[in-house]
């Protein structure tokens, strides 16, 4: 059962948070490629991170904490701006030459921080390095790319083994980072990972592990010098400490806030909580290959057992929006006609009885310790229909290690997880979890596999949209997951700061402004 006393608190939070968001976002500078910033001498912007980067080699990491830092040091070929538009980054424009070739036209006179030219050869080197098995990159978005071909100094073709209709969108973050060939060849990969050289709006200064990463404004950036001289990311895992640091003036922005932590700021003058729509979608993966979860009636029963709106209200204080399947509402392919499961305890019990489990059963629900509250709330709701879900909490590093391992059963029968579809295309949300041969899939459905192939390979938007709709219908009918919500992005910010996160939720800070008085 849920503490309904939180309702009033949630309503106050929602009203105050959204009002603050409206006021802040309306005044914030855009992160579109045009415009640039005007550097102010002596200004330093300090941002708290809930966890440290894992590496500063952008092609050997696949996590947002690392990318939130690296997106300020490196540029990508394309950019997702604050209005959710795909715009030019290092590539000014692009076009499809045929079903398996995308051509990118690069900006001229762009250099890496060490003076090395960023040209078509650098782009080709970066793409080839990323897809080389020897690099052991966890970035999967470019798995269809077979190579890059230099056409001239500022033109490069990316060739794929099968059609990839959203390749330009995949180059707006992890897959699109461009690295310096000469520097890496001369200094080595270890040195590059310790002192990264990019073309981005900030240059690297220092990394004190588990403490802070310091960057300096790049006065020669192609889009203009950033508005702050220095950007400091402070690693502060404890939200209470981060908020205290905000109020004491030690940091200017606190990121990665949970709804409960956001409440702690209260009505303190000079600060506000900003709520931004997020695309990170949360769900429970089910092992459909054995045990009770092999029966779709059981899987459907568990979806009916969950009161997702109650979870959002009581555990997340309203800072989320329900999703019918795995696809966030902003993504291409989301079908508003697909309706979520209705909370129906009686129907859940009836389905369990029909499947031979009138008294329920027991299994394990794995979760990162960071998601302890929501995992325990889910277990509490399942208990109401007789399903005893023992919550197994793992530290984030262990949880992630098991998630990406080759052992699909490493996290047990059920595990709670979030997935960011940062390309703003439904393909990103489905690619690793649905088709039977993908890394995190625990479901084998030939019809779903065929639809995945269709939406991933067709260049016709209408064909893709139809495939996504059919996929969502199957996902509802077969229920290989428990469908939950997409979480809002919450951050606390000083009134001195003007900044708005990109639609993909990354901490691109080039156009952040900080009042000095």
Image (cartoon, rainbow, N blue to C red):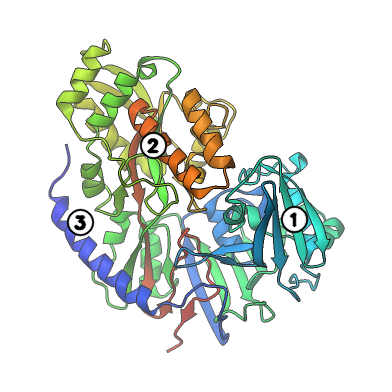
Tell me the SS state at disc 3: helix
Q: Looking at this view, is 512 or 152 the one in front?
A: 152
Report x, y in % for residue 138.
63, 43
In the picture, the disc for residue 10 is 3
Q: Compute the Cα span from label 2 to label 3.
A: 31 Å
How busy is the neighbourhood of tag 2: few (under 14 within 10 Å), some, or many (20 plus)?
Answer: many
Q: Compute the Cα span from label 1 to label 2.
A: 34 Å
Tell me the SS state at disc 2: helix
Q: Which residue is mark 2?
A: 472
Mark 3 or mark 1: name the one nearer the start of the chain. Answer: 3
Image quadrant occupied by the C terminus: bottom left
* Image-quadrant location for residue 17: bottom left
Which residue shows up at 69% across the image and 80% down it? 220
Q: Nearer the viewer, mark 3 or mark 1?
A: 1
Rendered position, 491 above or below 1 = below
Q: Which residue is mark 1?
A: 157
Which residue shows up at 31% across the image and 78% down it? 270
Tell me the SS state at disc 1: strand
Q: Is residue 447 visible?
A: yes
Rendered position, 170 above or below 254 = above
């Amino acid at each position: 059962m849920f503490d309904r006393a939180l309702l009033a608190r949630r309503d106050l939070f929602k009203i105050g948070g959204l009002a603050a968001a409206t006021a802040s976002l309306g005044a914030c500078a855009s992160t579109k490629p045009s415009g640039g910033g005007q550097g102010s001498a002596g200004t330093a912007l300090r941002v708290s991170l809930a966890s440290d980067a894992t590496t500063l080699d952008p092609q050997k990491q696949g996590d947002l904490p690392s990318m939130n830092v690296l997106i300020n040091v490196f540029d990508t070929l394309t950019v997702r701006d604050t209005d959710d538009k795909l715009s030019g980054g290092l590539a000014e424009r692009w076009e499809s030459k045929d079903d398996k070739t995308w051509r990118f036209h690069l900006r001229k006179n762009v250099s890496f921080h060490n003076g090395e030219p960023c040209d078509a050869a650098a782009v080709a080197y970066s793409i080839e390095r990323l897809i080389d098995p020897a690099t052991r990159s966890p970035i999967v978005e470019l798995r269809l790319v077979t190579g890059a071909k230099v056409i001239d100094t500022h033109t490069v073709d990316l060739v794929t083994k099968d059609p990839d209709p959203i390749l330009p969108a995949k180059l707006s973050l992890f897959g699109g980072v461009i690295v310096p060939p000469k520097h890496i060849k001369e200094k080595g990969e270890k040195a590059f990972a310790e002192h990264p050289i990019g073309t981005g709006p900030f240059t690297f200064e220092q990394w004190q592990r588990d403490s802070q990463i310091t960057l300096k404004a790049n006065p020669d950036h192609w889009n203009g010098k950033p508005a702050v001289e220095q950007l400091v990311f402070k690693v502060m895992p404890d939200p209470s400490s981060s908020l205290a640091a905000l109020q004491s003036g030690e940091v200017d922005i606190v990121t990665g806030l949970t709804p409960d932590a956001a409440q702690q700021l209260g009505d303190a003058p000079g600060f506000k909580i900003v709520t931004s729509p997020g695309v990170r979608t949360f769900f429970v993966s089910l092992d459909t290959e054995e045990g009770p979860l092999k029966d779709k009636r059981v899987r459907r029963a568990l979806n009916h057992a969950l009161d997702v709106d109650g979870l959002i209200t009581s555990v997340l204080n309203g800072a989320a929006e329900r999703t019918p399947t795995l696809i966030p509402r902003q993504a291409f392919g989301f079908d508003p006609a697909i309706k979520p499961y209705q909370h129906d305890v009686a129907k859940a019990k009836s389905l369990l009885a029909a499947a031979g489990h009138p008294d329920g059963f027991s299994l394990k629900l794995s979760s990162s310790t960071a998601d302890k509250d929501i995992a325990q709330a889910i277990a509490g709701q399942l208990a109401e229909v007789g399903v005893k879900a023992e919550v197994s909490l793992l530290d984030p590093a262990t949880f992630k290690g098991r998630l990406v391992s080759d052992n699909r059963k490493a996290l047990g029968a059920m595990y709670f997880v979030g997935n960011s579809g940062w390309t703003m295309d439904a393909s990103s949300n489905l690619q690793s979890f649905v088709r039977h041969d993908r890394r995190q899939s625990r479901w084998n459905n030939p019809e779903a596999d065929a639809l995945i192939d269709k939406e991933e390979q067709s260049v016709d938007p209408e064909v893709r949209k139809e495939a996504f709709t059919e996929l969502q219908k199957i996902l509802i009918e077969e229920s290989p997951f428990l469908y939950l919500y997409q979480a809002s992005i919450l951050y606390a910010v000083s009134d001195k700061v003007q900044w708005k996160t990109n639609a993909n939720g990354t901490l691109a800070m080039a156009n952040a402004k900080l009042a000095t008085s």
